[in-house]
C-alpha cells in the first residue's frame, strides 16, 4: 500500500515580513509613548490677573488670551476660591478676538484663587491648564490642579492609536488601489492585494468610528465611561471635527463601492474592455481619495493659522502623495512576497510604480517645504521647538527612504534586462517539462488500463477498482499541480534580481512604517510658530513685570532621579530693598505644574559677603510656593539659589544672579 503525503502548505509569514510587523509594533509604541499627553496647539499667551499676581481689590472678571481662537463649553473657564468652591458667574464670553473672560461674584474675600481652563484649539486638539492669583495676600488652598490632563490618560492613548490606524488605513487602501490601476492591472485578481486593500478600508472605517465615539471624552472629562455618552456624541457632531469624521464615513461608503468594482467587475473584464473602465475608476477613485484627505485638512493644522485657503489643498495633495508612494510600496511588497507563482509581478509593473513614486516624492518635497515654512516660521524653530525637532527626524527618514528607493530602481533595471534573456530559456524548460509530464501521464494511463483489464473477471470488483482509480487520478493531479506551482515559485525566487528587489522594497516599507509614526506625532504636536509666539508673549510679560519692578528668574533643574527634570521659576515683587513678596513655581519640561517634597531659596550678595539668607516658602497649591516679607538688606547683584528635592535622596541646587534694588 502506497502512502500519499500531501504537500505541506506554509502559512507562516516570511522572516522579513515578520521583521516589518515588529517594526510596525515598535513604531506604534513610539507613537503611544508620545501620545500620553496631547500637545497644546493653542497656547495661553496672557491673563488678567496674571499668574502669581497679588491684587489689592477683587477683580470683576478673569480673562485669558490664547494664541488662536478656541472653542469653549459652559464650564471651560472656572475660578475656584481657596476652599475649591466656584466663584465664577455665567458662561464664558469672547469680548475680543482670542481673549475669553468669565465674570466673578462680588465681595470675594482675600486669599489665593485658582483659574482652570479646558478648551479645544481651532485645529481640534484639547488644551488644559491652571494658574493662581491672590487677592490681598496669598493663602493656603485645597485646590489641586495636577489632574489637568486634557487629551491624556487611557482615552488619550486610545485616541492617539486611532489616529495612527486611520492614517495607516487610508494609505494602504488608497495606495493599494492606485498600484493596481496605475501599475499592475493583473493584480486585481490577486487575493493578497484584494485582502490588503480591503484591510485598509476596514482599518480606516473602524478607526473613524472609534474616534467619533472617543472625541467627546477626549476633549472633555477624559473618562472611559463617557465614551458611549450620547449627549457628548451629540455635541461632537456639532463641531468641525465631528462633521469631518461623519463626512469621512460617508466617503468610505463610496470607497466600498469603488473597491467592489475594482476587484469584481473590473477583474473579470478582458484587457481591451478594461480601458474605458480604468479611466472611470481612476477619476472616481481620485475624487473619493481627495475627499477623504480633505476630511483631515478641514479639521487639523491646515484649517487654521496662516494662509488656510492655500494650506488645505496643499495638505490634500500631500496626503495623496504619501498614499501613492507608501501605500503603493506596501502593495508592491505584498505582491512580491504573496502573489501566486503563475502571476508574478513583472518588471514593467515595478518600473511603472517607480515613476509613480518619483512623482509622489516631488510632490511631497514641494508641499513639505510649504508646510514647514507655514508651521515653523523661522530657522531657529527647527532646533528650539519639539515640532521642529520631529520635523528634522521626518526629513532624515524621507532622505533615507529615497536612498533605498534608488537602490530599488537599480534592481528594477537589472530585472528588466534579465527578463528578455530568461524568457527563451523559460519557454524551452516549459516545453521539456511538458513533454516529460506527457510521458508520465501516458505511463500512468497504461498502468491504470492494465489494472482495469486484470480485474475484468469480477463485475463488482471492476466497479470498485474504477472508482478507486478515479480518486487516485484526481489526487495525483492535485499533487502534480502543487509540484508545478512549487517549481515555478522556486524558479521565481531563485532569480537574484527579484530577490534583491524584494529585500530593498522590504527595507523601504520598514522605514515607511517609522515615518508614518513620526508623521502622526507631528500632527498632534504644537506647531513651532505657535510655540515661539507663546514664548515671545511670556518673555514680553516678564519684561513688563521687570519694568514694573518685579523680578522673574527661570532655572532648569535635573536631580538625576525618576521624574527629576523640570523648571523652577522665582518671582520677587517688587525686587527692592526691604520687604518683598516671593512666589516659586515648579513645572515639568512640558510646562505642567507638579509637586516635589521640598523647595528652599537662599539669597547671597557675594560682593559684600552677605548671606546666604535662607527662605523656606509655604506650599500654596500644586507646583506653587509662596513667602511674604522676604527681606533684602541692600541693593546689588544677588545670587538667588534654589534647592529642589524630588525624592528622599535626589536633590540639586540651581542658581542665577540678578540685580535687586
Image: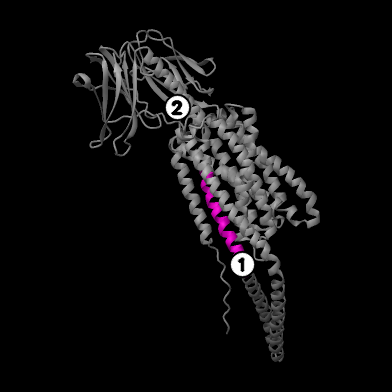
Residue position for label 1: 495
Does residue 659 appear left or right of residue 96 in this picture? left
- Check residue 455 in the rendering and tell me which mark sits there, or answer none: none
Q: Position of residue 39 (x, y in %)?
A: 47, 32
Q: CA distance from mark 2 to mark 1?
A: 59 Å
Start-end of magenta stretch: 491-517
Q: Would you place residue 480 above or below residue 584 in this image? A: below
Pinpoint residue 497: horizontal percent, then vertical percent: 61, 63
In this picture, residue 520 sits left or right of residue 255? left
Picture coordinates of residue 128, whole percent (x, y)? 45, 27
The answer to if 495 sits in the magenta stretch is yes
Where residue 384 appears, as percent x and y from the top left, is 45, 33
* Placement of 652 over or under 56, stated as above or below: below
Instruction: Tell me, yes or no, whether the highlighted magenta stretch contains residue 567.
Output: no
Q: Which mark is residue 128?
A: 2
**Residue under the image location 50 percent in, 20 percent down:** 74
Secondary structure found at label 1:
loop
Amino acid at each position: 500500500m502506497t502512502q500519499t503525503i500531501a504537500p505541506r502548505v506554509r502559512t507562516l509569514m516570511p522572516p522579513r515580513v515578520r521583521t516589518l510587523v515588529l517594526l510596525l509594533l515598535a513604531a506604534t509604541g513610539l507613537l503611544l509613548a508620545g501620545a500620553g499627553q496631547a500637545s497644546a496647539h493653542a497656547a495661553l499667551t496672557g491673563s488678567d490677573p496674571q499668574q502669581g499676581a497679588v491684587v489689592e481689590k477683587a477683580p470683576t472678571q478673569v480673562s485669558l488670551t490664547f494664541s488662536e481662537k478656541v472653542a469653549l463649553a459652559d464650564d471651560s473657564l472656572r475660578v475656584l476660591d481657596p476652599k475649591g468652591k466656584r466663584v465664577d458667574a455665567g458662561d464664558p464670553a469672547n469680548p475680543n478676538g482670542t481673549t475669553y473672560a468669565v465674570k466673578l461674584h462680588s465681595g470675594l474675600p482675600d486669599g489665593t484663587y485658582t483659574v482652570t481652563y479646558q478648551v479645544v484649539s481651532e485645529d481640534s486638539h484639547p488644551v488644559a491648564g491652571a494658574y493662581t492669583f491672590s487677592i490681598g495676600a496669598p493663602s493656603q488652598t485645597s485646590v489641586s490642579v495636577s489632574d489637568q490632563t486634557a487629551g491624556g490618560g487611557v482615552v488619550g492613548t486610545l485616541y492617539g492609536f486611532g489616529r495612527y490606524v486611520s492614517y495607516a488605513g487610508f494609505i494602504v487602501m488608497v495606495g493599494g488601489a492606485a498600484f493596481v490601476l496605475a501599475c499592475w492591472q493583473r493584480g486585481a485578481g490577486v487575493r493578497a492585494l484584494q485582502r490588503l486593500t480591503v484591510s485598509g478600508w476596514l482599518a480606516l472605517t473602524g478607526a473613524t468610528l472609534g474616534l467619533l465615539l472617543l472625541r467627546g471624552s477626549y476633549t472633555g472629562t477624559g473618562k472611559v465611561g463617557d465614551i458611549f455618552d450620547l449627549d457628548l456624541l451629540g455635541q461632537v457632531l456639532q463641531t468641525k471635527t465631528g462633521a469631518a469624521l461623519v463626512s469621512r464615513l460617508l466617503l468610505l461608503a463610496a470607497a466600498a463601492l469603488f473597491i467592489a468594482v475594482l476587484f469584481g467587475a473590473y477583474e473579470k473584464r478582458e484587457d481591451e474592455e478594461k480601458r474605458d473602465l480604468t479611466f472611470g475608476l481612476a477619476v472616481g477613485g481620485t475624487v473619493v481619495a481627495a475627499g477623504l484627505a480633505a476630511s483631515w485638512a478641514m479639521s487639523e493644522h491646515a484649517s487654521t493659522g496662516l494662509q488656510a485657503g492655500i494650506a488645505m489643498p496643499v495638505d490634500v495633495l500631500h496626503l495623496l502623495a504619501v498614499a501613492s508612494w507608501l501605500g503603493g510600496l506596501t502593495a508592491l511588497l505584498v505582491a512580491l512576497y504573496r502573489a501566486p507563482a503563475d502571476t508574478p509581478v513583472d518588471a514593467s509593473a515595478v518600473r511603472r510604480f517607480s515613476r509613480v513614486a518619483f512623482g509622489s516624492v516631488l510632490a511631497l518635497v514641494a508641499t513639505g517645504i510649504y508646510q514647514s515654512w507655514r508651521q515653523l516660521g523661522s530657522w531657529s524653530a527647527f532646533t528650539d521647538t519639539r515640532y521642529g525637532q520631529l520635523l528634522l527626524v521626518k526629513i532624515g527618514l524621507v532622505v533615507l527612504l529615497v536612498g533605498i528607493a534608488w537602490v530599488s530602481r537599480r534592481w528594477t533595471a537589472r530585472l528588466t534586462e534579465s527578463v528578455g534573456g530568461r524568457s527563451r530559456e523559460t519557454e524551452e524548460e516549459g516545453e521539456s517539462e511538458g513533454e516529460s509530464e506527457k510521458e508520465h501521464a501516458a505511463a500512468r494511463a497504461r498502468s491504470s488500463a492494465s489494472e482495469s483489464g486484470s480485474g475484468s473477471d469480477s463485475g463488482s470488483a471492476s466497479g470498485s477498482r474504477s472508482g478507486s482509480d478515479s480518486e487516485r487520478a484526481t489526487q495525483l493531479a492535485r499533487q502534480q499541480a502543487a509540484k508545478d506551482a512549487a517549481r515555478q515559485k522556486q524558479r521565481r525566487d531563485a532569480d537574484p534580481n527579484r530577490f534583491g528587489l524584494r529585500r530593498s522594497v522590504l527595507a523601504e516599507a520598514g522605514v515607511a512604517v517609522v515615518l508614518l509614526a513620526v508623521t502622526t506625532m507631528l500632527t498632534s504636536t504644537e506647531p513651532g510658530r505657535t510655540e515661539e509666539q507663546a514664548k515671545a508673549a511670556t518673555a514680553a510679560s516678564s519684561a513688563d513685570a521687570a519694568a514694573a519692578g518685579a523680578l522673574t528668574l527661570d532655572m532648569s533643574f535635573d536631580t538625576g532621579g525618576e521624574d527629576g527634570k523640570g523648571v523652577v521659576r522665582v518671582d520677587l515683587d517688587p525686587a527692592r530693598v526691604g520687604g518683598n513678596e516671593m512666589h516659586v513655581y515648579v513645572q515639568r519640561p512640558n510646562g505642567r505644574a507638579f509637586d516635589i517634597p521640598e523647595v528652599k531659596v537662599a539669597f547671597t550678595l557675594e560682593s559684600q559677603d552677605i548671606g546666604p539668607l535662607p527662605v523656606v516658602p509655604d506650599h500654596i497649591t500644586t507646583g506653587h510656593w509662596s513667602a511674604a516679607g522676604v527681606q533684602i538688606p541692600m541693593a546689588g547683584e544677588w545670587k538667588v539659589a534654589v534647592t529642589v528635592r524630588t525624592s528622599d535622596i535626589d536633590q540639586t541646587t540651581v542658581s542665577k544672579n540678578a540685580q535687586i534694588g
